[in-house]
Image: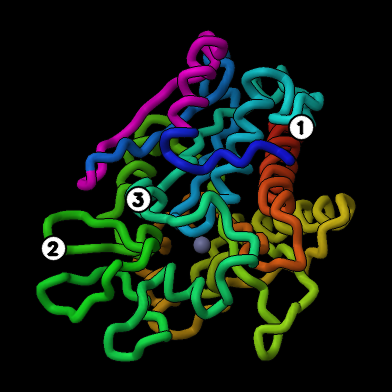
């Protein structure tokens, strides 16, 4: 099986290896989360080529319970820096051209506190039912045993009868308060993005996620991956057309690689969750193209390799797309 690298100590070991062989092609930044964990931004490019001649892409993952996103990023970083993937197979793209035509920043582990408290390296459906997995993600509601706790952008320990342990989706930002990283600007996920965006002014942002793709009654829906695009009211020209074309290209490549991909959709939230996205991403969507992957997790019917390979495939397609766009521009 492909090495599954998702825990902070595994990632830090990999970063040490990369630092010794990357030469001037890798720049490492980080911020320190309230928990004391380092949250890394790994930027890769041929830095002898000026920024103005390149496209800049940000790739991130906010959710501690979605470790296949981290593992997929590590597989692509390995290719960018060594010319081979984690299994030793040749690089899936023209590495020299990608380095010369793009700047790519990876935030492979957006909430290392949550990831450190994640009981498994990955979720393959053999240990947690969908409901148990939800309780791991959001915490088990003390007032409704067996049910998951609420999903909010920000909560304060002093105001809540909070789960014990708390859900691994949340990141502590001070002594009392917790956020879901992609729903509050107070998260390390957002702070690191803005810190890096000041340096590189990204034109593209690929956010990586995982979900269970449950059918009715938690049955197998038969799908393993899908692209979520921004809420319709957040789409601004020309990024809307670019998002559509980009999403279609990833989806086609997934299908060509044998993944049971569903057609891209707009982010399907309608309730307060949609409001969180409006608050946090409206300005960002005005400036850049931004889409999200969703890849299957915690389903015993599907081998865990899908979690890594569908993510790395989405990134590889994106690199090829940016390369083609930059060369034709
Ligand atoms: Zn997610």
Cβ at disc 1 under 8 Å from ligand 1: no
Instruction: Check the image and report above or below for 6 versus 130.
Output: above
Q: Is residue 23 visible?
A: yes
| Label 1 environment density (alpha carbons within 10 Å; few <14, some 14–19, many ≥20) | few
Q: Quadrant of the C terminus?
A: top right
User: Residue 205 location in percent, x, y?
Assistant: 53, 47
CA distance for labels 1 and 3: 32 Å
- From the viewer's perspective, tell me whether residue 144 is left or right of residue 315: left
Q: Are marks 2 and 1 in contact (CB under 8 Å)?
A: no
Q: Is residue 31 left or right of residue 212?
A: left
Q: Earlier in the sequence, mark 3 or mark 2?
A: 2
The residue to which callout 2 is attached is 176
**Which quarter of the picture shows residue 226?**
bottom right
Instruction: List x then y, in percent, for residue 6.
Output: 52, 43
Q: Position of residue 303 (x, y in %)?
A: 75, 56
Which disc is residue 190 wearing? 3
Is 33 inside the magenta-drawn segment?
yes
Q: Which residue is mark 1?
A: 328
Q: From the viewer's perspective, is the residue at label 1 or at label 3 nearer?
A: 3
Residue at 27%, 75% (x, y): give it.
163
Disc nearer the start of the sequence (2/1)? 2
Which-is-in-front pick, marks 3 and 2? 2
What's the magenta region?
Answer: 11-35
Q: Residue furthest front?
A: 127
Q: Secondary structure at mark 2?
A: loop
Which residue is located at x 63 percent, y 58 percent? Answer: 293
């Amino acid at each position: 099986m492909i090495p599954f690298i998702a825990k902070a100590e595994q990632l830090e070991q990999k970063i040490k290896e990369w630092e010794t062989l990357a030469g001037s092609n890798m720049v490492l930044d980080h911020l320190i989360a309230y928990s004391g964990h380092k949250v890394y931004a790994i930027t890769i490019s041929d830095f002898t080529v000026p920024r103005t001649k390149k496209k800049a892409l940000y790739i991130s993952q906010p959710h501690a319970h979605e470790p296949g996103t981290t593992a997929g990023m590590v597989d692509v970083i390995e290719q960018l820096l060594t010319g081979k993937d984690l299994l030793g197979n040749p690089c899936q793209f023209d590495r020299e051209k990608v380095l010369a035509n793009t700047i790519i920043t990876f935030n492979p582990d957006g909430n290392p506190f949550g990831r450190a408290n994640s009981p498994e390296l990955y979720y393959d459906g053999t240990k947690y039912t969908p409901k148990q997995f939800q309780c791991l993600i959001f915490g088990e509601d003390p007032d409704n045993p067996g049910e998951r706790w609420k999903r909010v952008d920000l909560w304060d320990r002093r105001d809540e009868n909070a789960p014990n342990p708390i859900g691994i989706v949340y990141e502590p930002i001070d002594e009392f308060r917790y956020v879901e990283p992609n729903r509050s600007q107070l998260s390390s996920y957002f702070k690191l993005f803005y810190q890096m965006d000041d340096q590189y002014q990204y034109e593209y942002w690929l956010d990586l996620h995982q979900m269970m793709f449950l059918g009715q009654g938690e049955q197998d829906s038969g799908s393993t991956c899908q692209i979520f695009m921004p809420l319709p009211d957040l789409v601004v020209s020309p990024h809307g057309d670019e998002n559509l074309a980009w999403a279609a290209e990833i989806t086609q490549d997934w299908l060509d690689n044998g993944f049971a991909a569903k057609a891209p959709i707009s982010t399907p939230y309608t309730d307060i969750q949609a409001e969180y996205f409006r608050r946090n991403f409206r300005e960002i969507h005005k400036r850049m193209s931004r889409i999200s992957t969703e890849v299957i997790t915690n389903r015993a019917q599907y081998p865990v390799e899908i979690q890594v390979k569908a993510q790395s495939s989405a990134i590889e397609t994106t690199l090829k797309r940016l390369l083609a766009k930059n060369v034709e521009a």
